[in-house]
Image (tube, rainbow, N blue to C red):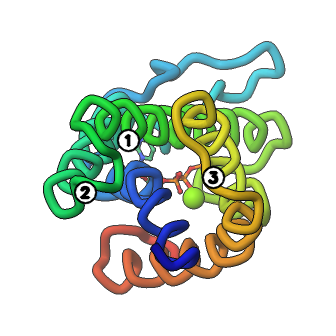
Amino acid sequence: MNPILDAFWYILPAYFANSSPVVLGGGTPIDMGKKWRDGRRIFGDGKTWRGFFGGLAVGTSIGVVQHLILPSYYGSLRIAVEVAFLLSLGTLIGDLIGSFIKRRLNLPRGYPAVGLDQWGFLISALCFAYPVRTIPTGEVLFLLVVTPIIHWLANVFAYKMKWKSVPW
Ligand code: CTP
Ligand code: MG
């Protein structure tokens, strides 16, 4: 496969896991409203159980769809589910770590943290999936460059669709 297509095909479950909580999220926050010892929220209201498990389910399902479209890519349904699950779990945990850091820096929920918002989930996803499947370093570098642009475009789109109150 063309390296650019290969990089996008590989990271697709992570992109879906990161974006679907915007639509699926809401309800009980993961930190249950609890505060850290600095008096500020652990993660904040932007990280919910519904968003977490919704993103995990959607991201993992993308792997199954990818396997149906292109069976030769993963080679087996088991590997497809494993890789997509790990990429999604890595994405959502990376996103949580990002919010944890943002709250410690006293940044309010939804406040943009350039770098953390775009690379945190990506790097975490790549690390989680690494033991099962990786992509060449060049493709990782390509994703590091294009993901912030795609992240920004996706957020502007979500804002225009009125799914989000701010375009970042
Ligand atoms: N979301 C969710 N659960 C998650 C992740 C995201 O419900 N685990 C939803 C929330 O409605 C959130 C929206 O998706 O507001 C956008 O996600 P994100 O930009 O990651 O959260 P922010 O609201 O910007 O909060 P933070 O400052 O903590 O990043
Ligand atoms: Mg945000």
Between residues 7 and 159, which one lies in front from this camera angle? 7
Mark 2 close to ligand 1, CB under 8 Å: no
C-alpha gap between disc 2 and disc 1: 9 Å
The amino acid type, in three-letter code, at marker 2 is: Gln
Residue 109 in sight here: yes
C-alpha gap between disc 2 and disc 3: 19 Å
Q: Residue at x 34, y 46 (%)?
A: 74
Q: Residue at x 30, y 44 (%)?
A: 75
Which image quadrant: the N terminus? bottom left
Q: Which residue is drawn at 49% across and 44% down?
A: 46
For disc 1, the marked residue is: 84
Q: Residue 66 carries which label?
A: 2
For disc 3, the marked residue is: 122
| N-terminal-most mark, 2 or 3 | 2
Pointers 2 and 1 in contact (CB under 8 A)? yes
Q: Where is residue 114 shown, x and y percent of the image? A: 78, 66
Under tag 3, what secondary structure? helix
Q: Which residue is drawn at 75% across and 67% down?
A: 138
Q: In which quarter of the image is residue 95?
A: top right
The amino acid type, in three-letter code, at marker 1 is: Ala
